[in-house]
Image: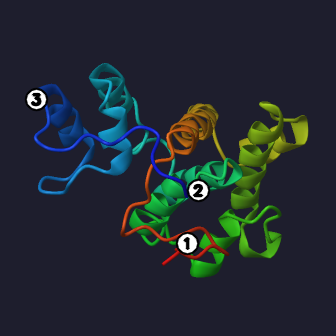
Amino acid sequence: MSSPRIAPLEPPYADAVQQSFAVVMPAGTPPLNIFRTVGRNPRVLSRMVRGGLLDKGSISIADRELVILRACARCRAEYEWGVHAAIYAERAGLSAEQLADTWSDLVDASLWSDAQRALLAMVDSLHRCADLDDATWAALTANYDDEQMVELVMLAGLYHAVSFVVNAFRIEAEAFAPCAPGREVSP
């Protein structure tokens, strides 16, 4: 990956920026590169960290992470995919094979339940045409209620926006995050 287009902030951080970091980062954990970069605009950082959907919502962590990983993969946002793969994939119960499959252009349907296949189809459809056809809608609503549908579609859209940020700014990968399947870190 090329050099970052916007250099991440370096400590010491302004109070407002540090307060935003505290919303999303566990105490004692340095802020991620994405937050240090968006911190160049403290107002946007503040709204970004307060508008996330990583809290306990109406969907399971497994469903949440599947949507996030697939949305990032479809946008080829390797930075964000890697962060979620490292931090959440195990908690979400994703096998190594499933995790790798989220990055595939064509997923292996045998790895996923009916509900998971519906989520993958949702993300792919929203990415491709910004809409859901009736068959995808029916498959989703067979498994998710209205409250969950709102969260799922918003989540896919939010991670499209996050993908735009990490890709456009060329945010540098976190040391702990894996590369996307089929990619290796250059020496």
Sooner in the amino-acid sequence: mark 3 or mark 2: 3
Q: Mark 3 = which residue? A: 15
Q: Quadrant of residue 30?
A: bottom left
Q: Name the spot of residue 24 as percent of width and height, x first.
A: 27, 43
Sooner in the amino-acid sequence: mark 1 or mark 3: 3
Q: Is residue 100 left or right of residue 89?
A: right
**Label 2 – label 1 distance at C-alpha:** 11 Å
Q: Name the spot of residue 5 as percent of width and height, x first.
A: 47, 40
Q: Mark 2 = which residue? A: 69
Q: Is residue 129 left or right of residue 187?
A: right
Q: Which mark is residue 22?
A: none
Q: Amino acid at mark 3?
A: Asp
Q: Amino acid at mark 2?
A: Leu
Q: Residue at x 32, y 24 (%)?
A: 41
**Label 1 – label 3 distance at C-alpha:** 38 Å
Q: Which mark is residue 94?
A: 1
144 versus 79 height, above or below? above
The number of numbered discs placed on residues in the rendered structure image is 3
Sooner in the amino-acid sequence: mark 2 or mark 1: 2
Q: Is residue 85 left or right of residue 135?
A: left
